Image: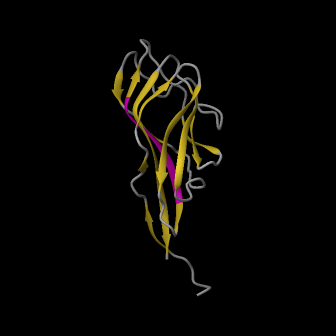
Amino acid sequence: MENERLVARSMFTPIPDWSETQLDLTIPAAAGTLVLPNVAVVIPDGITIVKARAILASRVIYNSNVALNKLNGATVAATSQVIQIQKGAGAWSDAINFIDDELSQAGLIRDAGVCIPGTINLSAIITGSDTYSFRWLLARADLDSIILQDVKMAIQYSYLVYK
C-alpha cells in the first residue's frame, strides 16, 4: 500500500463561483483603488487545483464623458491598473492585468458589458474553500468617468481528483 501510486482519475472545470452583484463601479480620471465584490468558494476535499483564474463581468459599460474615453495606463505589476485578489486576510496578488487604452468607448455611449477573464494562474492562491476579496488597484480612465454597471467577479478553477 505504501508503494501504491496516485493516479489522476478525472479532471474537472466546474462552472465559476460568482460574487453578488455590485450595481456600479466608477473608474475616475484620478487614480483610485476600487473595491470589487467578494467571491465565496467551496472546494471539495481531496482535490488538487491545477489552474485558477479570476473573471470580471459587467452587464453595461458607460462612458459618461462627451469625448472618447478609455483606461489610462497599462498594468504595472503589483502597483497599478490591475485587479488584485486576497485570500482571507492574506497578501494581495495580481489577478487581471489591463493594457493601456483598454475599455475604449465613444463619448456618452452606453454599450453591452464586458467579460474579462484573467490570464494569471491563481492556483497558488485558490487552495481551498474561503472568501476571496478583489480590488482594482489605482484604476484610472483618461477622462471622468467610465462606469461599469451590474458588476460581478468570479473564480474559475480546474482540478484533479486522485484515487
Q: Residue furthest bottom?
A: 1
Count of numbered circles in the view: 0
User: Percent position (x, y) of residue 74?
Assistant: 58, 29
User: Percent position (x, y) of residue 104?
Assistant: 45, 24
Q: Is residue 149 left or right of residue 135?
A: left
Q: Is residue 93 left or right of residue 43?
A: right
Q: Is residue 79 left or right of residue 10?
A: right
User: Percent position (x, y) of residue 75?
Assistant: 60, 33
User: Percent position (x, y) of residue 31?
Assistant: 59, 23
Q: Is residue 31 above or below residue 48?
A: above
Q: Is residue 131 above or below residue 57?
A: below
Q: Residue furthest top?
A: 66
* Applied colour scheme: secondary structure
In magenta segment, residue 142: no
Q: Which residues are magenta?
A: 50-60
Dominant secondary structure, magenta: strand
Quarter placement of the N terminus: bottom right
Foreground pick, 85 / 108: 85
Report the residue at 58% width, 50% height from top.
Answer: 87
Q: Is residue 83 left or right of residue 25?
A: right
Q: Is residue 147 above or below residue 162?
A: above
Report the residue at 51% width, 76% height from top.
Answer: 7
Report the residue at 44% width, 16% height from top.
Answer: 68
Foreground pick, 125 / 96: 125
